[in-house]
Amino acid sequence: MAKSANSVQTEGKNFLVAQLDEVDPVPCPCGQARRAFDVPENTTATIHLVDIAEDSRIHYHKNMTEIYLVLEGEGHMELDGQTFPLRPMTSVMIKPGCRHRAIGKLRIINIPIPAFDPEDEWFD
């Protein structure tokens, strides 16, 4: 069984397993993200545990759809200039081209589809 920086993969098996709270955080436009299943052979989807400690930067993606699920905190989501309230169990689907940012101190799950690609983060 081989272990990458953020998941355990059993060679020859059709699954990946990750313990999100043990994945090392990395900086992202939204704060700090713990990215699971971010391995070259996976192009399907990834899952991120994101701590948004301050207002994030407005950005968009040309190819990725993102699904946010708020776990903790309250704040707002700016989507193409409109603001929507966020609280635990609020979910938001962000399609390619939508300029977005989270506002407030939040902990979210983010599911990028297809798998996260750092080259698909764009800023105006």
Image: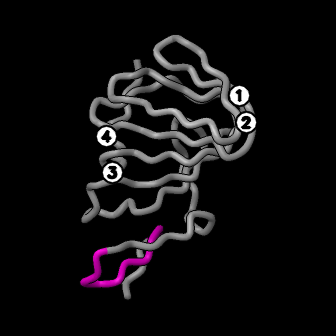
* 103, 26: nearer the viewer: 103
- Helix, strand or loop at mark 4: helix
Determine the residue positioned at 57% across, 64% down: 20
Residue 33 placement, left or right of 114: right
Q: Mark 4 or 1, which is nearer the eye?
A: 1
Label 4 or label 1, whichever comes before in sequence order? 1
Q: Is 6 covered by the magenta stretch?
A: yes
Give the amino acid type for the residue marked by disc 1 in the picture.
Gly
- Helix, strand or loop at mark 3: loop
Label 3 or label 1, whichever comes before in sequence order? 1
Image height check: is 43 above or below 27?
Answer: below
- Which residue lies under the disc numbered 3? 115
- Is the magenta region chiefly helix, strand or loop? loop
Determine the residue positioned at 57% across, 42% down: 69
Image height check: is 12 above or below 96?
Answer: below
Give the amino acid type for the residue marked by disc 2 in the picture.
Lys
Locate residue 113: give its quadrant: top left
Label 1 or label 2, whichever comes before in sequence order? 1
Residues rendered magenta in the picture: 5-14
Q: Residue 88: percent from the left, percent from the top?
A: 70, 40
Dot label at residue 36? none
- Which residue lies under the disc numbered 1? 75
- Which residue lies under the disc numbered 4? 119
Q: CA distance from mark 3 to mark 2?
A: 25 Å
Q: CA distance from mark 2 to mark 4?
A: 26 Å
Label 2 or label 4, whichever comes before in sequence order? 2
Determine the residue positioned at 29% across, 81% down: 13
- Which residue lies under the disc numbered 2? 105
Q: CA distance from mark 3 to mark 1?
A: 26 Å
Position of the C terminus, as image quadrant, is top left
